[in-house]
Image (cartoon, rainbow, N blue to C red):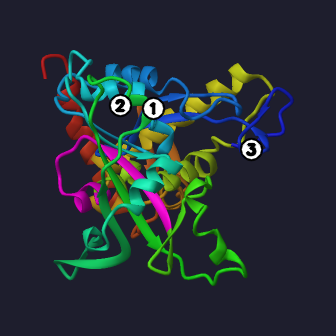
Amino acid sequence: MESSKEEAYYSYKKVKGYQPLNAWWWEHNYAVYSEFRDGNVLAGYEQKRVFEETLFCLPQDVKKVYLRSDTAGYQHELLKYCEKGENRRFGRIEFAIGCDVVPELKKAVYEVKESDWEPIYQELEINGKVKRIETGHEWAELCYVPHEISRSKRGQEYRYLAIREVLHDRELPGAEMETLIEQLLPFPNIKLNNKRYKLFGLVTNLDWEGGKIIQWHRKRCGYSEHVHSEMKEEFCGGQLPSGKFGSNAAWWWMMLLSLNLTSILKSIVLPKSWKTRRMKIVRYRIIHLAGRVIKKGRELIIRLSKGHPGLELLISARQRISSLCRYCAPGG
């Protein structure tokens, strides 16, 4: 989050600001854990500790946990923690995490036969039927062991997948001369069979088919950029009120409480069609309705005009809230 506060530090984007780290519960669509951090703190800093504290926050009826993350989670300490089952409660945790495209991984990609590359499909539901659509991306399994886990015979074994995407841009003059040395360049681009590709890496301990793993990994956080935008813009998490770190951290946590309460509202109280709607629609259709508040005796009455389009929605929401009361009552 870019910020001009005096106490803010420069981030990797070369602007001053803050860089919170969030753990998102995908099935229930809310944040389980978050740390408000300075802008100069890397996203991969102490990922194992953050993941342990996140697991501690989960309710007791959760029995199985999966982890998916971008390349910030590519920490061998975290991978080992998940694979060896060091968490007493959940044991071995299956994961799919993006990995860095280093020169050694690119060399392993060059060794893959062209016949071993398989297309990646996207499953879409159209008119009640699930159709598989080609994405233009391909994947292949790599014979690759990074240096960090190759020092000992007891090192962990993971699956490394490569994903390639054809680049259709025209090459600059002289670019063809870089083919022999591009394996050593720190860019995720390769040239195979006179085609230039953008390369992505994925590490996992899942035994699923590779295409299924990639599709599952791409669903992380229900599209994380969408969630981050909602946090910063619609819940004002990016509009920090103070120049002090502690005050801004408190503001961030209040934003997360509002975000989670709204997610619970959309999941439990409102109809199913509201689950994916943004906060802007919730404000327009529910919160900012024009009405009259009347206090009569010990009752609080909200009066709307007859036939108002939001009236039926409010009544059904109130009925669902009242039906939840019996579960909250002592002995319920």
Tell me the residue at 60%/57% (across/down).
187
Tell me the residue at 16%/29% (across/down).
63
Find disc 3 in the rendering and name its residue.
2
In percent of width and height, residue 320 lies at 25, 46
Question: Residue 323 lies in what quarter of the image?
Answer: top left
Q: Which mark is residue 79?
A: 2
- The residue stretch that appears in magenta: 198-215
Determine whether label 1 and label 2 are within 8 Å by CB: yes
Q: Is 39 above or below relative to 239? A: above
Determine whether label 3 and label 1 are within 8 Å by CB: no
Of the image marks 2 and 3, the number of the one nearer the N terminus: 3
| Amino acid at pointer 1 | Gln
Q: Is residue 303 magenta?
A: no
Determine whether label 2 and label 3 are within 8 Å by CB: no
In percent of width and height, residue 206 lies at 21, 44
In percent of width and height, residue 148 lies at 43, 30
Q: Nearer the viewer, residue 47 or 203?
A: 203
Q: Is residue 41 left or right of residue 14?
A: left
Extreme residue toward the left, this view: 331
Tell me the residue at 50%/61% (across/down).
281
Judged by depth in the image, the label closer to the viewer, 2 or 3, is: 2
Q: Dot 3 surroundings within 10 Å: few (below 14), some, or many (20 or more)? A: some
Extreme residue toward the right, this view: 6
Question: Residue 89 lies in what quarter of the image?
Answer: top left
Q: Secondary structure at mark 2?
A: helix
Q: Secondary structure at mark 3?
A: loop
> Real-space Cα distance between discs 2 and 3?
31 Å
Q: Is residue 203 magenta?
A: yes
Q: Is residue 70 left or right of residue 67?
A: right
Q: Which mark is residue 75?
A: 1
| Amino acid at pointer 2 | Leu
